[in-house]
Amino acid sequence: MRAPSSILPVLVRDVIYVAGGRVIIDRVSFELTAGPRTVILGANGAGKSVLMRLMHGLLTPSTGTIAWNRDDPARRQAMVFQRPVMLRRSALANLEYGLQIARVPPAERRQRALAALEGVGLAALAQRPARVLSGGEQQRLALARAWALRPEVLFLDEPTANLDPTATREIEAAIGAVHAAGVKIVMTTHNLGQARRLGDEVLFLHQGRLVERAPADAFFRSPASPEAAAFIKGELPWV
């Protein structure tokens, strides 16, 4: 059982999100607890990324509520986007700047930044300019930058999109290291193999609705909804 100070669980209650006159998220309710890695799946336009942005606080529900166990969740969570922005400085300095913005004491920044780079396999590139790193290395750097903040919850939006198999394996290993350190992982992916490898549970969205929630092995072995079955067979559009 986690300490009472944890921001988890988070309760999503009857959330609706409307943009441009279109319902993107349609009366979605669920609870996320610490521990299991949660993968959000669904076809193109299902609302996966929007749902994560709502939980992260980047968007506000049109109606409904998202209630964390604490009133200050923003400082205890982080998010890595599909196309991370790198500052014009070294890999290490990118992390140290993020820690400075988070008001981490100066004496702690270098140690935390180096530990995070080591954790994602980038220690040897600490002094390399971040913008000359490969796409996979930049994504691992973004992951390290988030991990250095010591979040309880880490949101990952398509963390290996457009990366080659080698870079994908490296990112997956880094995600595994973050999870092993006790961080709750919530991620979207278009890669069903990756969802099987990294997911403990699946939230399946279809047209903005939460159609199915199940342990990952049960979801892939015997989906309970026709929409999920069609998606697994490749009969629904991909992200």
Image: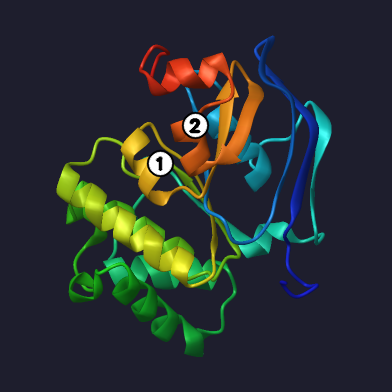
Q: Residue at x 39, y 11 (%)?
A: 235
Of 81 and 29, nearer the camera is: 29
User: Which residue reaches farthest front?
Assistant: 222
Q: What amino acid is at disc 2?
A: Leu
Name above or below for residue 114 compared with residue 229: below
Chain-order first, disc 1 or disc 2: 2
Q: Can residue 191 be seen in this view?
A: no
Of 188 and 194, nearer the camera is: 194
User: Which residue reaches farthest bottom?
Assistant: 107
Name above or below for residue 111 compared with residue 238: below
Residue 230, position in %: x, y? Answer: 45, 15
> Crowdedness of circle 1 by 10 Å Cα count: few (<14), some, many (20+)?
many
Of 220 and 65, nearer the camera is: 220
Q: In this view, does 225 lie to the left or right of 192?
A: right
Separation of disc 1 and disc 2 at Cα?
Answer: 8 Å
Give the quadrant of the C terminus.
Answer: top left
Which residue position is annotated with label 1?
195
Look at the numbered disc 2 and give the secondary structure of its residue: strand
Residue 108, position in %: x, y? Answer: 49, 86
Q: Point out which mark residue 206 bears.
A: none
Circle 1/circle 2 CB separation < 8 Å: yes
Q: What amino acid is at disc 1?
A: Ala
Residue 29, position in %: x, y? Answer: 76, 34
Name above or below for residue 226 compared with residue 94: above
Which residue position is annotated with label 2?
41
Q: Which residue is drawn at 53% across and 33% down?
A: 49
Q: In which quarter of the image is residue 73?
A: bottom right
Give the quadrant of the N terminus.
Answer: bottom right
